Image (tube, coloured by chain):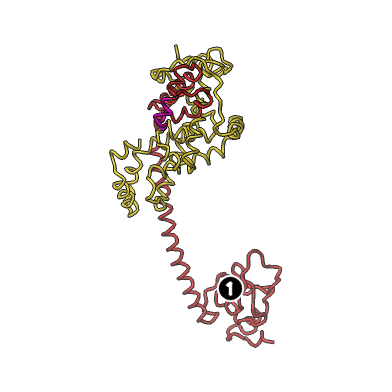
Amino acid sequence: MALTNCRDVWPAISDYLDGELSPALRAEIDQHVAGCPKCASVLHGTQNIVRLYRDPRMMPAPTGIRAGLRQRIQAHAAPQRGTLRGLFTGLAVVGAFAILLLMAGSYSGNETALRAAMSHPAYSTPVDPGFVTAHGKLFHRAGCPFMHGPETLLSAADAVAAGYAPCVRCMKEALHSVEITPQGPPLETSLIR
Amino acid sequence: MAVEVSERRTEDEERELIARIGRGDTELFYELIEPYERRVFAIAMAILRSEADAEEVAQEALLKAFLHLGQFRAESRFGTWLVRVTINEARMRRRKGHLDIMKALEDQRQSDDEGSFIPQDFADWRDIPLEELERKEVCELLARALTSLGDKYRDVFILRDVEQLSIEETAAALQISEGAVKTRLLRARLMLRELLAPGLGGMWSKTGPTATLKGVNPWH
């Protein structure tokens, strides 16, 4: 028995072409199409479309993919290895620095290499304030107007141990102590209230 | 294509290849992708319609595949996975760069009800002979008709008909159901037929309104 309504045929066209229909339904469609020019146009046209697009000539050929890909993979691989190596190097440097810092901390302030070669070192560890803000090569009292940029809060002892020099403005006392006793041992008492 | 690959290389061989790449023999990656390279480019090309974009996206997709090969799960075929990576990459690029009128038209078509396409043109269909594909303009015409489809229809048609994946593979690549593949495929095929029909203003109609396609007649 043939399908009578064209609208029952159209939804099955695609499955018909893919061979996904039951033999019975297929036979019904064949029968309908044989007597229906409209459905014949739809079926043949669709079949032709599928055949055309499936032709290898419709597939574009890749051109320079391989060479470009190789470059990109290499470019990616190099920084990746570099990153790993860099990470280990970085860790090693940080570790070494930490060790140096610890070692430096175990010595007195005088023996620590100064961050600023031309500055006067602190001859004493200021106890007032107990905590200072360090920036660049100097350490300051909190709120010192001569400090700019990012600051690190640390204890005065650590600042001296880390090689920061006292700010000549806000940390005068630390330097005065130098003037008072140029060759003498650190005059901690002058700074202790 | 799937048949071709399995003829040359079994799934087990492919898995072994991937394992060796994972162990550091990266040079084998080029051997792994060799049977898929053309397909990756074709998919990117069909979605993006620009050779330069397609080439870049194909490279990007293959690079991603290389970098994320460790994430590839062996339960799917490498080829299917690679197709998925390529489609995603091409879609991302398409979203980025195509806010033109074509896009607006696509969106309009996309919102159409799936599967409700009714053929309008019933002119006697004279087959376009395959030899016509020798003519560059005919190939371009077909490509242009394809690109005028909505994204979801185009993607299914490309995988199923141009790339000749099975319905199952197409569904897996696009992560949609097989039913959705069939519905969209039907619509895509019927729309293309309509676009290229010789009758009412089809792209190949001499008297059709599609001025840009004037002069290209595949029956001559």
Towards the viewer: B156 or B92:
B156
Q: Is B98 on the left-hand or right-hand side of A16? A: right
User: Does A163 lie within the magenta span?
Assistant: no
User: The chain coloured yellow carries which letter?
Assistant: B
Q: Position of residue A40 (x, y in %)?
A: 47, 19
Spot the red chain and give its letter: A
Residue B18 visible at all: yes
Does the magenta portion include A25?
Answer: yes
Comparing A53 with B53, the one in front is: A53
**Which residue is pictured at 64% across the width and 63% down the height?**
A149
Q: Residue at x 44, y 46 (%)?
A: B64
Residue A129: percent from the left, percent from the top? 67, 79
**Mark 1 sits on what residue?**
A164
Count of numbered circles in the view: 1
Judged from the image, the secondary structure of the residue bearing numbered disc 1 is loop
Q: Quadrant of the N terminus of chain B?
A: top left
Of B105 and B57, nearer the camera is B105
Residue B133 lies in what quarter of the image? top left
Q: Is residue B7 above or below residue B28?
A: above
Q: Which residue appears at 42% of the width and 40% of the height?
A: B168
On the question of residue B53 being in view, the answer is no
Residue B188 lies, with reference to residue B218, above or below; the image says below
The magenta stretch is A17-27
**Closer to the camera, A32 or B97?**
A32
Picture coordinates of residue A166 (x, y %)? 63, 75
* Amino acid type, mark 1: Tyr
Left or right position of A47 against A121: left
What is the x, y in percent for residue B32?
33, 44
